Image (cartoon, grey):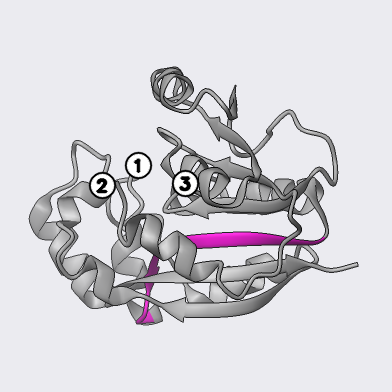
Amino acid sequence: MRPGGLELTLRSLQTCPLPVETRVLDLGCGLGASLNMLCSVHGWCGLGVDISFVSLNKARKCNPGQSWIQSTAEQPPLRDGCMDLILCECTLSLFEVEPVLAACERMLKTGGWLLISDLYARNEKGLDALRQLPPGSCVSGAFSRTELSQAIEKHDLVVMQWEDYSEVIKDFPLCTLSTSACLDPFDLVIASARAKLGYFSCLARKQA
């Protein structure tokens, strides 16, 4: 369950040229809904990585045609240059950003694509308010467009497309975006308002 759902995944990849036999990796795949949809529609080969054994066990039962690995997103046990497409959907803000982007650069083929969708601060001056929230939620880990773009470009990845989809969180309860049990709802609303919390989809491509 995430803002925009599967429709946003398809919409974000519309302009992304990919080979017929695309190998796609989902970092923080959860129950594997995106992989199942993309592989069913396009016939791609999918691999899901998640730290949760419970989620992966359910994903295997629901999607037996795909492959699943229990691992952190920062150090997946995969060879270099093995993926055409990597998904980080509403998960990058929960990870250690630099190690994950380095891993994506390593695993992507030259010309491969990275799709990130997540929360971001449309008002960079409100980032401090988000950072003061207790850790453990994608809200407190949200970033600005500038800092994420700069982080991406440190890893031989070029931002090819950035789309604002903030409308998808208008009817999405903020409390469902947090996994922190100690996060005060009032603090969450105030910090989100200061940062003008939004939602984006970003496509980046690995250069030669």
> What SS does tag 2 mark?
loop
**Disc 2 residue type (three-letter):** Ser
Residue tagged 3: 37
Q: Position of residue 162 (x, y in %)?
A: 53, 78
Q: Nearer the viewer, mark 1 or mark 2?
A: 2
**Disc 3 residue type (three-letter):** Met
Going from the N terminus, do you reach mark 3 or mark 1 first? 3
Label 3 packing within 10 angstroms: few (<14), some (14-19), many (20+)? some
**Disc 1 residue type (three-letter):** Gly
**Residue numbers of the magenta segment:** 111-123
Does the segment drawn in magenta span residue 97? no
**Cβ atoms under marks 1 and 2 closer than 8 Å:** yes
Q: What mark, if any, has residue 114 been given in the picture?
A: none
Residue tagged 2: 178
Tell me where residue 148 sits by quadrant: bottom right
Q: Position of residue 72 (x, y in %)?
A: 58, 31
Q: Number of labelled discs?
A: 3
Question: Residue furthest toward the right?
Answer: 208
Q: Main secondary structure of the magenta part?
A: strand
Between the C-alphas of marks 3 and 1, the distance is 28 Å
Between the C-alphas of marks 1 and 2, the distance is 7 Å
Tell me where residue 47 sits by quadrant: top right
Label 2 packing within 10 angstroms: few (<14), some (14-19), many (20+)? some
Instruction: Confirm whether residue 118 shows in the render.
Output: no
Is residue 32 depicted above or below 53 in this figure? below
